[in-house]
Structure formats: C-alpha cells, structure tokens
Amino acid sequence: MDIIKNKSTYSLNLVKSAIGLWDPIRIEQAISNLVSNAIKYGAGKHIIISVGIDSLNAKITVEDHGIGMSSEILSKIFNRFERAATIKTYAGLGLGLFITKEIINEHGGKIVAESKLEEGSIFTIELPI
C-alpha cells in the first residue's frame, strides 16, 4: 500500500511522558510496526495513538477502525508468519507483530491485541518504568 495515498487521519493522546530504560531504536521499531499495520489495515479511517503511564508501566496504544480480525486469527497474530489478511490483498510476510512481541518481551513488557471484524483493532504495549 502506498502510504502517501492513504487518507487516514491521526490523533496522538499524550497523557504524560513515559520514561524508562529501554532501547529507543527497538521501541521505535515496535511502535512503527503497530502504526504501519494500523495504516495498512485501517481502511483509511481514523487512527488513535495514546501514550500514558500508571504506577508501574508506560502504556502505548494504537487503535484503528479498519478491517479487524476474527477471534481465531487474533489468537495467532503474534506467531511467526501469521497474517490477518491474504497476501493477495495486503503485502507482507507476517513477521511484524512477531518481532514487536519479541522486542516488548525482551524489555520485560507485554503486548495485547483486541479486535472485532469490520470494527478495527487495538494494540496495547505495556513497558515497565
């Protein structure tokens, strides 16, 4: 998909700065993977990126309102070479979310996904602060 032609709108909700001892390049890669997927599968609809903290964790959430995933696909989406859509419809190898999960796990964090078909997806990263 040509990102330049994408007509998605974006919001950034920064509740509070999130500071931690993380590898900034890897965290940027993880967030970039989630935002790229939101653009790819978001069907040109609004994307919301939120950053906040609680007493123990920084939380980064990427939400789209696109094609979404079935519960069957959702249960496998962080596996290597898993894809939410066919390669004929959307390009990719099915490694982005696998890599993202590995990055977050190596930082002592976790990533979870929620999704409903035709309603979009929400990915939440939690990292210890």
Image (cartoon, rainbow, N blue to C red):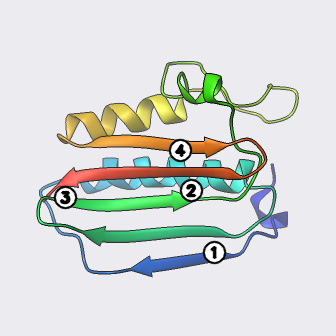
Q: Which mark is residue 35?
A: 2
Tell us which disc is closer to us: 4 or 1: 4
Residue at x 38%, y 80% (from the top left corner): 14
Q: Earlier in the sequence, mark 4 or mark 1?
A: 1
Determine the residue positioned at 44% across, 54% down: 31
Looking at the rendered image, the disc whose residue lies closer to the viewer, 3 or 4, is: 4
Number of other residues with Cα within 10 Å of mark 1, as a class: few under 14, some 14 to 19, many 20 or more: some
Residue 114: image tag = 4
Q: Which residue was labeled with disc 3?
A: 57
For the residues carrying marks 3 and 2, which lies nearer the camera in this image? 3
> Which part of the image, by quadrant, shows the C terminus?
bottom left
Q: Quadrant location of residue 2?
A: bottom right
Q: Secondary structure at mark 3?
A: strand
Q: Is residue 75 above or below residue 118?
A: above
> Could you tell me the amino acid type at mark 1?
Tyr
Marks 2 and 4: which is nearer the front? 4
Report the mark closest to the observer, 1 or 3: 3
115 versus 82 height, above or below: below
Q: Nearer the viewer, residue 128 or 32?
A: 128
Provide the secondary structure element on which disc 2 rests.
helix
Of the two numbered discs 2 and 4 on the same chain, state the one appearing first in sequence. 2
User: Is 128 on the left or on the right of 91, as rendered?
Assistant: left
Which numbered disc, 2 or 1, marks the residue that appears first in the sequence?
1
Q: As shown in the figure, which amino acid type bears the numbered disc 2?
A: Val
Please, what is the three-letter code of the amino acid marked with disc 4?
Glu
Q: Amino acid at mark 3?
A: Asn
The label shown at residue 10 is 1
Pointer 1 and pointer 3: residues touching (CB < 8 Å)?
Answer: no
Query: Where in the figure is residue 99, as x and y percent of width and height?
Result: 43, 32
